[in-house]
Amino acid sequence: QLQASGGGVVQPGGSLRLSCGASGRTLPSNTMAWFRQAPGKEREFVAAVAHSGGEYYADSVQGRFTISRDNSKNTLYLQMGSLKPEDSAVYFCAGSRRIYTRRSDYYRSPSYDLWGQGTLVTVSS
């Protein structure tokens, strides 16, 4: 099971870093990602990091967010900057034991079979 943390309230233009761990154990997945879901909206892809280290981002966060994983700490991160009110959502980390070769697979929630509880991010003045 994955556990996301680090959410909170931040002003527009601010920064926040989310973390995702596996209860102190080794991250079980080859491919890991962040998704988010705002009230009344469908869950959407935010960013993914491949087993190879390749990174994938939604257009809406490209250049503002950075995904990374520290295998020595068994933790996945999402560094968020230049936050906007429309970034407000519950953020979920997800993982897959599969290694994907098609770019499109990283963007699809069904590609991930391991999900964590979300952490709420609110961007508001």
Image: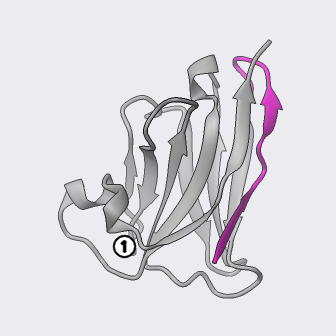
Location of the C terminus (image quadrant)? top right
- Please tell me in which quadrant of the rendered image residue 54 appears: bottom left
Q: Residue at x 64, y 87 (%)?
A: 26
Q: Residue at x 63, y 24 (%)?
A: 82
Percent from the top left, x then y, of residue 25?
70, 87
| Residue positioned most to the left | 102
Q: Is residue 93 in the magenta section?
A: no
Taking 50 as reference, is 89 above or below it? above
Percent from the top left, x then y, of residue 87?
58, 28
Q: Is residue 125 left or right of residue 48?
A: right
Taking 84 as reference, is 24 above or below it? below
Q: Residue at x 62, y 20 (%)?
A: 84
Q: Which amino acid type is shown beneath numbered disc 1?
A: Ser
Q: Is residue 116 left or right of residue 6?
A: left
Secondary structure found at label 1: loop
Percent from the top left, x then y, of residue 61?
47, 33
Residue receiving disc 1: 52
Taking 59 as reference, is 48 above or below it? below
Q: Nearer the viewer, residue 96 or 47?
A: 96
- In the image, the segment drawn in magenta is 1-14
Taking 21 as reference, is 56 above or below it? above
